Every structure is written in C-alpha cells, then in structure tokens.
Image: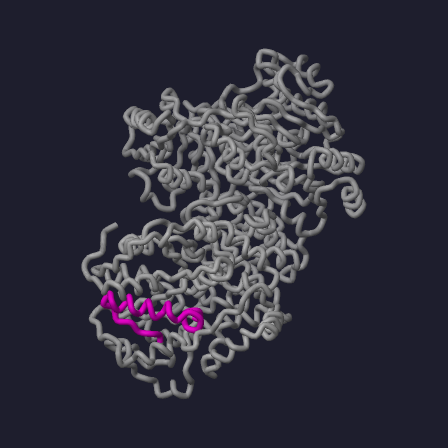
Amino acid sequence: MTDSPVLETELRAAVRGEVAFGAGARALVTMDASNYRRVPLGVVAPVDAEDVAAVLAVCREHGVPVVARGGGTSIAGQATGTGVVLDFTRHMNRLVALDPEARTAVVQPGLVLDRLQEAAAPHGLRFGPDPSTHSRCTLGGMIGNNSCGSHSVAWGTTADSVRELDVLTARGERLRLGRDWAGAPEGLRALVEGELALLRTGFPDLPRRISGYALDALLPERGADVARSFCGSEGTLGVLTEAVVRLVEAPRARALAVLAYPDEGAAAEAAAGLLPYRPLTVEGMAADLVPSAAELPRGGAWLFVETGGESEAEAHARARTIVRAADVLDALVVTDPAGQRALWRIREDASGTATRMPDGTEAWPGWEDCAVPPERLGAYLRDFRALMAAHGLRGTPYGHFGDGCIHVRIDFDLLTPPGVARFRRFSEELAELVVAHGGSLSGEHGDGQARAELLPAMYGPQTVGLFERVKGVWDPDDLLNPGMLVRPAPLDSGLRFAVLPREPVDVAFGYPADGGDFTAAVRRCVGVAKCRTESVSGPAVMCPSFRVTGAEEHSTRGRARLLHEMLAGEVITGGWRSPEVREALDLCLSCKGCRSDCPVGVDMATYKAEFLHHHYAGRRRPAAHHSMGRLPLWLRVVSRTRTARLVNALAGVRPLARVARRLGGIAPERPLPRLARRTFSGWWERRRPHRPAGHGDLVLLWPDTFTEHLSPAVGQAAVRVLEAAGLRVALPPTVHLARPPVGDGRTVALDPLSLLRGRGRVCCGLTYVSTGQLDRARAVLRRTLDLMEPVLETEAPVVVLEPSCAAALRTDLPELLHDDPRAARLAARVLTFAETLERHAPGWSPPRVGRPVVGQTHCHQHAVLGDAADRRLRRDAGLTGDLSGGCCGLAGDFGFTRGHYDVSAAVAEERLLPSVRKAPDGAVVLADGFSCRTQLQHLAGVRGRHLAEVLAEALDEHGAPRGPRGGE
C-alpha cells in the first residue's frame, strides 16, 4: 500500500502548484455528479505542463493512479479516483490564444466553456458544443467526455471541434495529437491497421455515439485523426495539457420556437422531421420537469427549436416556418434575448430538477444519456417506458431529441441491497434495449463506471478486447483513471450512498421536504455544480463566496460534499465537531441563494445553522455569536435603560470602539452601527392619539430588530404609506392577550395574569438561527407565537419590512418549530410591504416618483419571498430600471465578523457597488435590507433607502393619490 506521507512529501518537492492531502481536500473530490464515490490519496493543482509531468513521474514511481478533473460535473463517475486527482481549475484555466481569422483558440484544460464563449463573442464566433453545464464545465472535461450540448444538431460534438491536442502519457511522453497519425504513441498505428475490418463494421453510425474509444476516427478514410480518437477517452489514455479548438460563426440573431405536444412521445416522434429545416437545436422535455408551465405554450411536452439568421426577422421567419411545418398543440416564438434566456433556463435546470420526482421521491443518474437514431426515438421511448414500468421504476425523459439522445433520472433505490440489485438488472436489460434500437449506451456524458461494464452488449467482446489493447499501448501501467472504460469496476459497486448512516440523524430543523431526514437533505446535492458559476446575471444569487474565492470548499456543492463525508465518517472523522466542515461553512454568507438557484433546492444556510448548533453544543462559542447572535437582547437592554445616546457616544471614542470590536469578535474595519435615540415602538406610542381611524383592512406591522432599534425611519415611512392606502395599522401585542384585538387593532382585552408575566417583544429569531443558537431561537420563537396567538385568530396579515426577517418567519420558523401548528399559521400570514399593498389595498395607486432606480434585490427576498409585487409597485410609482441580483456581502453578522471583511467587500464589488457607481443622475438607490444599506454606507458612502421611505417622501411632496393601480 502506498505511503501517503512519503507520496505527499515527494509531490511537494516536485511541483510548484498546491498539493493537498488533508481530509477536507480529499473529501471535496470523492464524488462528481454521478452515483459513485472514490476516495483519493490527495489532490494536486498543477501550474503548468511541467507540473503535470512531475506528478506523473512521482505517481508512476509509486504505482499510484492519476485522475484528471475539471469542473467535476461528469455523470458516470469518471472524475473521481483512488490515487491523485489533478485539479486543473485552479491554475491551468487560461485562454492561451484566440485567432479570429483562423477561427481557432488555444485553451488549457481547466478553462470554463463560458469564458471561451465570452472571448469569442466579440468576433462573432463561438465554440459549437454547449452542455447545460456551460457556466462551470471545462474544456478539458468536455474533451475527455466528448461532450455535446443542445446545439449538436448544428455543430456536432466536441470531437468535431478539436484540431490538435497536447498530451502527456503516463510514462511522461509528450505528444501533439492531430491528423495523419500525428502524435500517435508507438504501436498504435500497427495495432489499428491490423484491425481495419473490425473498425469499419463494429461501430454504430449515429450522431451521438460517445461510448467506448472512437477508434474509427483512426481509419485512413477518416484522416487517421489521433486527436479526434482521443476525445471521449475519459482520461484513461493520456493527460491533456493544451488544446487547439475550432470555433464556428455565431448567428447574428436567433429565434426560439417552443412547440407544444400532448406528451413526450409525440414530441419525440416529431423531432426527426424538423432536422431538414437545419435548426440549431431540437431539445425536448415534459411537464414533469417544469416547476411552472406558465411561460410555456399549452401542452404536456415541448420541443425547444432554435433558429439563426443574419437578422432578427430572418431568424423569426425560419422559426415560423418550423412552427407551420410542425403538428403542434400550441407554439410560441421568442426573439427577445432575455425571454429566450428565461426559457432556456427552464431546460438547463432539468438536470437538477429531474433529481426529484413530483411527489418528492429521489431520482438518480445512471442511465442519463443513451442515444438512438433520431428516427427511432419515439419507438425507443415507448419501449423504455415499458421497461421502467416492468421494474416498478419512474423517470421523466428529456434531452436532445434532435440527436436521439435522452437524459433521464430514475427513482432507483440505491440505499438497500434489493434496490441496488434491481438497479443492476434494469441496467443490463436497458443496455440490450438500446442496442436493439441501434443506439449507444452513452450519447453525451461518457461511460465511466455507470456503463463501461455493459460495453460488450454494444460492441461485442472482440471490439471491447481491442479497447483493452489500445489502452495498453497508451498506458501500459494502467495508471490513468483505472476502472473506467476498460476492465471497469462493477456498475453497482462504490455507490456514494452506501457509506451514509441508515438511521435518521438527530437534528433541530424539521426538513419537511426531505421527510425530516438530514441525510436525505444532504443527498440533494447531485453535483451539477450550478453553484460553481463564476459570474451570474439577472436576479441570481448563488454562490457569492465561491465567486470571490474560486475554491470548491466555498461552493454550495463543496460544502454539501463535506457534510456528506462528515455523515459517512470515513474521510471526515470529527462528526459535528469537524474543523474541516466548520472552516468551509465559515465563509457561507447564509444568503439562501442556493435555496432558489440550486436546481434541487439545497439550503446551505439551514445546513450551516444546523451544523453550528451541534458543533458548539456544550462548547465555547466565538465572541461574534454572543455579540451579534444575541443582538436583539443587547438592543432591548439599551432600549429599556434608555442609554442609546450614551452607547453611541462611547462607540465614537476610537480606543473604546476598538476594544468593543475586539471583545465582540467584530471586524476592525467596520464602524459600529449607531443606535436610534428613539425606537420605532417608542415613536408609535407617542403617536397614538394622532393615528387616523381608517376603514380599510387591519394589518399588523412587525417591529423587527433592525427597524425597531437601528432604522426606525423605515417603520415610520411604512406606516405613513400603509395608512395613506387606507389600511389600519397595528403593532403586535407585547403582553399575552385573552382574546384578539378588536376593531381598530388598538383596543385589547388583557388576561389578568399577563401583567404578572411582564411585557415581551416579538422576534423572528434570525440572529440566533444564523449563528446556530437553535435552542435559544426556539425559545424566542415560542414566546413570539405565544404573543401572536390571539392575532392568528384574526384575518390580519403580518407585514415585515426587513426581508431577512420575513424570510426567517416564512421558512425558519415552521422548519424549526415543525411540531407547533401555530408556526405554519404565522408563516402563512407573513407579507412583504409590496405584497400587503397589492393584496389589501388593490384600489390604491402609489405616488408618482418618476426616477430611475439602482441597487440590489435582497438575497433573501429573491430566494424565499419573491419580488414580483415589488416590481409592480415600483412600476406603478414610476421607478424605472431593474435591480441587480447577487448579495451585498454584509449578510447580517457575516460582514461584521472578524476575518470576513475582505470577502464581504469583494462580494459587494461583484454587482452591488458597480451598479451604484453606474447609476444615472437622480437615481434612487433602493436597499430594503438593513445589511444592504449598511454595506452601501460603509463601502460607497451612499445612503440606500427602503422602498417605503421613497414612497413616503413622494407622499409628502405630492399628497396621497387614490384610484386604481395599474394592471400587470
């Protein structure tokens, strides 16, 4: 057995890149996006080809396998290994050159596809293949798997776009692969020329044949193209260090025709008939994969058919021609780029969405991308459905219908021996079915461990034997990705779920979407890695910490992988006390972006709170957990003692402020926030005699901690606007009531015992939840429910101005107090400011502001609450422009905590601060969250305002107009 410390020492001495053999680094790469798990000895991030050669030399001496890894999105297990994993994403990720005239680019293997597309776009060029993971998959991974994507009907597979490849063999030979046997290792030509008849007859002729080695590319009539034959070899023949790839001319304009059919069978039957019209794409999916079909034409399944042209009119005309030629229930043609992106996002998210059946049952890859001749797709799908039914399995096919390539996640039971046995039987029978239809076991993602064992069913033993001989020519020591393609590991071995605990883990949150099982919640992450996107557009948020650091452990997937290994207990052995998991979660902003942006709804903010709860149970907590985690308590003390002015004065003395920050675990770069001299509730009480009676609906305005103590002007503005809209405003009770408020929301009947219990304040528990003080959060929330119980007997909505507090009440409250029915009732009552006006004052029109807006939609609003009502309210008020997505970077206590300042500022620099700097004259800087406003003030010296403040100011200027609001 290899001595890991010796191997690590020699690698550190030999390479300039990072060498990591720690538990955390290894745990991060035990899995890709497949069902499989292999634990490596270590991870190396090479700087250049010299580093790669050095790694191969050391590993060859020790007999240690080497696996090349890009974005880790492979679905068949080929991006995992038991030896040394080469991570090309850290350093070897450059676009070396781009020649617009020759239409070629020179790329390193770790370059993300979208970066190449961005560089080529100004020249009217693009790389043809574009998998749905285009925002995070790498060129090296695409070459290794011969990836395709939605545009393969127009531009083929990655192999069609490869000119030359620089490759290192396991024995250190440097080869430059090309046509006419260029770069062929010694012995390959003689081997192939001795088997020409087999090469000419043993390979199915279909556009998506990805399975096995592409040895037919070495035929003399096909140019003896060694580079092309290397594509799809899954890192088993050599290690790619650089590639020359071909670019294609991008259409100047595009149109997207969405064709609706009764079911996926009808869509599949129609797909091949559209190919003569030379579309750019023919993609298919069914209703089961669409969260909401509101944006799609009426039907049960759809084809996404894209056309191109020199102008929008030409692209549109081609799309209309296809619509007329297709026998459809309904159709939609979109030429607007933003509208097309929104529709494509539905299709691209299917790889994650498909991992949950409509009833919440888990579904898994394994038979992700079989391909048959396009004209046989309908018949194949019928037989495929029948086979699933015979095995009692379910799945929803989708994918590249124009190429006959089907993706599907199936509800295999991979947790029990009988379930795994059925998985094997089904796999064997499906392989026979695919071959009977003239198909390929893999049509896009490669064979890996998932299908390589079954290649004899497709190719026969003679051709599979030839594959083994070719592997022996390239890699005689079997060091490169052993167990893939040739001499494969069994398809039902090494399943990643086998190491997880069988009994539910004792946890604090309810995890209702996962049957109360934390292990099932962690299993949600299937590795599609949308969280590893290096840049986001539109309203997206996930994952801000990864975009700043670029480190896998700071992605949602990386953290989920560490939690998976923590539960397994093999690599991460500290359980809830694990320092590796704690360090990875330390830079999680708890923005909740993954809750909405992750295709399978991984909720890392909740997982983080859960982990911190267990990690610090019975242990000393960080100072920031006491200072900021218990912020509502300290602010209430200041309010009761009426010492806000004194605290502000002391905070203004630099030596005292410095000491306070040190003791409180607060970043020294952060100014301490100033407390309001008079709380929002104090202002409310003083105003009691002057409140308008009103005749509209009664609404309860939630005095969250930030509005109450730090920005009461927001609450005052909200009261002004709500009352102008004719609503009756009340605050939550501060004593336990015998019965609900009556009439005006001010008169109450007191329980005689309530005076003995004392006054209290409602609280959403956010600061306790975010720091993992879940026992305290439960106590605070139960007290809140006690106070709110009589209010819940009324019809009054609860208006929450702070988005993070509203999100906590909507999600954390019912998930943390899942055993208290009052929690769900209160969560259902929570409305945002804009939702309240829209639902309870529909006849009211806001004052006309007539100014552009900039700023950022609060990350919790995006992830949990939604901002449709806010956008409509802004439109009706004449506030033009869109807010950016992303996260402000302060994120409650995150940006205030010592050690987080640099990351916090970098997150703000990604989208928020640039949007404010580019603001047109007279623009309103909107920031509904206290954290967002604080970050703007600290980093840009700009005062952000809540939408309520903007509307209240306009009321003061223009009065309170009444009348119907504009329609949607």
In the rendered image, residue 906, in percent from the top left (x then y), is placed at: 55, 53
- Is 821 rendered above or below residue 536? below
In the rendered image, residue 376, in percent from the top left (x then y), is placed at: 42, 24
Q: 690 or 634, which is in the foreground?
A: 690
Taken as a whole, is the magenta stretch helix, strand or loop? helix
Name which quarter of the figure residue 299 lies in: top left
Name which quarter of the figure residue 254 lies in: top left
Q: Is residue 604 left or right of residue 567?
A: left
Q: 561 or 495, which is in the foreground?
A: 561
Does residue 733 appear in this view?
yes
Q: 918 or 229, which is in the foreground?
A: 918
Does residue 453 appear in this view?
no
- Is 234 rendered above or below residue 935? above
Name which quarter of the figure residue 806 lies in: bottom left
Residue at x-position 31% and y-position 35%: 262
Residue at x-position 73% and y-position 41%: 16
Magenta segment boundaries in residue numbering: 705-732
Q: Is residue 721 left or right of residue 405?
A: left
Q: Is residue 790 left or right of residue 380?
A: left
Residue at x-position 57% and y-position 58%: 503
Give the residue furthest to the front.
921
Magenta highlight on residue 895: no
In the rendered image, residue 695, in percent from the top left (x then y), is placed at: 20, 71
Quadrant location of the N terminus in the rendered image: top right
In the rendered image, residue 967, in percent from the top left (x then y), is placed at: 23, 51
